[in-house]
Amino acid sequence: MIRFTDVYMRYPAGSDVLKQINLHVEQGAMVYVTGRSGAGKTTLLRLIALVERHTRGQIVVNGQNLRRVTGRRIPLFRRNIGVTFQDHRLLNERTVFDNVALPLAVAGYRYQDIKKRTSAALDKVGLLSKEKAFPIALSGGEQQRVGIARAVVHRPALLLADEPTGNLDPALSLETMKLFEQFHQVGVTVLIASHDFDMIKKMNKKIITLHAGSLLPHGRCGERSAPP
Amino acid sequence: MSKKTSKNRPVANLNKIIGSWFLQHVQAFLSSLGQLYKNPMNALLTTFVIGISLALPAGFYSFLENARRVTSNWDTTSHISLFLKTDIDDQRAQALADELKNHADIKTVEVIDREAALLEYKQNSGFAAALDALEHNPLPPVIIVQPKIESISSMNNERLLKALRALPEVDSGQFDRQWAQRLHRIIEVFQRFIMIVAALLSIAVILVIGNTIRLAIHNRRQEIEINKLFGATDAFIQRPFLYSGLLHGIGGSLIAWLLLETAVLLLNGPVVRLTDLYGSNFSLVALNFREIISLLLLGAGLGLAGSWFSVKRHLRAIDLI
Ligand SMILES: Nc1ncnc2c1ncn2[C@@H]1O[C@H](COP(=O)(O)OP(=O)(O)O)[C@@H](O)[C@H]1O
Ligand SMILES: [Mg+2]
């Protein structure tokens, strides 16, 4: 599903943020990316969603070499991906329903389909009763779940989540992670970036550890993420 | 497999594509209407500025059209002046005039004899002293012919003039339409002036709409980013802004039209009283149907152009890649 070969990334101003990344995420896998703040987790996700371009190496996502995904192919490529953000990035002047329906509207679905799928997605995250509310009226955990519903409403093959438990208490965090596991169980490839190592250790899934832009070997052995 | 079904039902697919395309346009249109509704004061102000900008050239144009209608009435006073040869005396001139009275295309004939011609010339030319010094009256008699058909542009009258010029007694002949010609030249100057004003104000309209759209893009930056992140095409993102520009332009045209009608309403009373003094039954008109449609199209075009430039410029700044 995702394959990085000797990938380097450098923002216009600065040094390499990702260095010689080699990784492979199989179709239908669920993988955690961990590492300290500033290690490059968000950047890794941004490269996969084509928010940024890598500067060297090769990235293949869903069989497509990202170097060749340009122009009009970018929107079509992104429709196969769902993303959640650390700061939720909900549109505050739109209702919960409209926020979740956005990926479908963007892809030109008919209203009946939008209605059906959006309700289903909201139901899945337990917020169907809040569909007419505005995001500001929701708690942080609820907002995060609206973001998750928006990320899965168009049934993408790949789900990218950046710090989904960032501001949540442990119980809520665990619940959120369980939610992602459910999507994983129906065949979605899930990639979650989180600095909350203690929590993801409990999930018993493959863990990729970044340290200052480099991948640490022995992915499952998360203890190595601590600097020497 | 999906390829096979799409091959089997191309018509259904086409319908679906057209349906979806239409739906997206309706969505974009409603979305831009919604934006206008959310910010009615801003939209109204912008539309009013556009309306005034369009009303100015449209008003000038309308003024000119009315002037043209007045001067086409003035054509009716045009006549032919026949300057006879200098060896023709007043009696011969009078005889010729009596003859011409029976011509089918001629309504009235008037003779200005040599004495009268000299007097008139002295009064108008300022050469009175010089002429007094002459022993002879150097001026020929003049016959003023009023054709039956009143317009100077009539082909009949051209033919009449040609025939009259061919008469042995006639030295030269011409339509006396200096007045009308001067007026037409003045109108031409004004037309050019209006075109320049219109061009400048059109640019102003494009800039105003462009700026409005720029602000709208700025205010909706987050929404645009999210749309892009979830796979919106550039066309999808641009559409509501283009519709917004279009609506502003059309709204501006409507306001311009309204302003113009109001101006005509206010001016018509005094104008009618003025032209009554000249025995004319002239009355101001604003725009006819075709001109209203043109005004609307102009506004729509400028709105679209303004938003298009703005969208091209400012959406690029939000490119995620
Ligand atoms: N837009 C940007 N421009 C320049 N540098 C950036 C940008 N975003 C992140 N960085 C830098 O890249 C590094 C990795 O950041 P990030 O990927 O956000 O790490 P993480 O998500 O693991 O905290 C940091 O040093 C950060 O300062
Ligand atoms: Mg981060």
Image: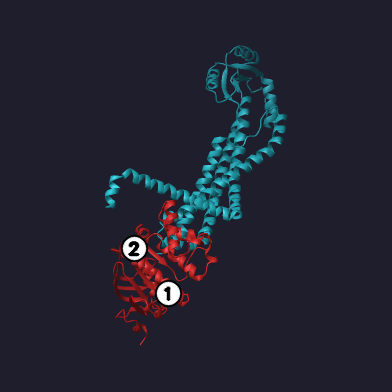
Chain colours: A red, B cyan
**Residue A157, numbered label:** 2
Q: Which residue is mark 1?
A: A174
Q: Residue at the spot x=60%, y=42% of the render?
A: B257
Splitting the image into four quadrants, where does ligand 2 fall? bottom left
Q: Is residue B289 above or below residue B109?
A: below
Q: Quadrant of residue B296?
A: top right
Question: Same chain, marks 2 and 1?
Answer: yes
Q: Secondary structure at mark 1?
A: helix
Percent across and percent down for residue B218 are 51, 61
Q: Chain of mark 2?
A: A
- Disc assigned to residue B172: none
What residue type is disc 2 on? Ala
Which of A171 and A108 lies nearest the eye of the viewer?
Answer: A171
Q: Are marks 2 and 1 in contact (CB under 8 Å)?
A: no
Residue B188 lies, with reference to residue B84, above or below; the image says below
- Secondary structure category for the residue under label 2: loop
Chain designation of label 1:
A
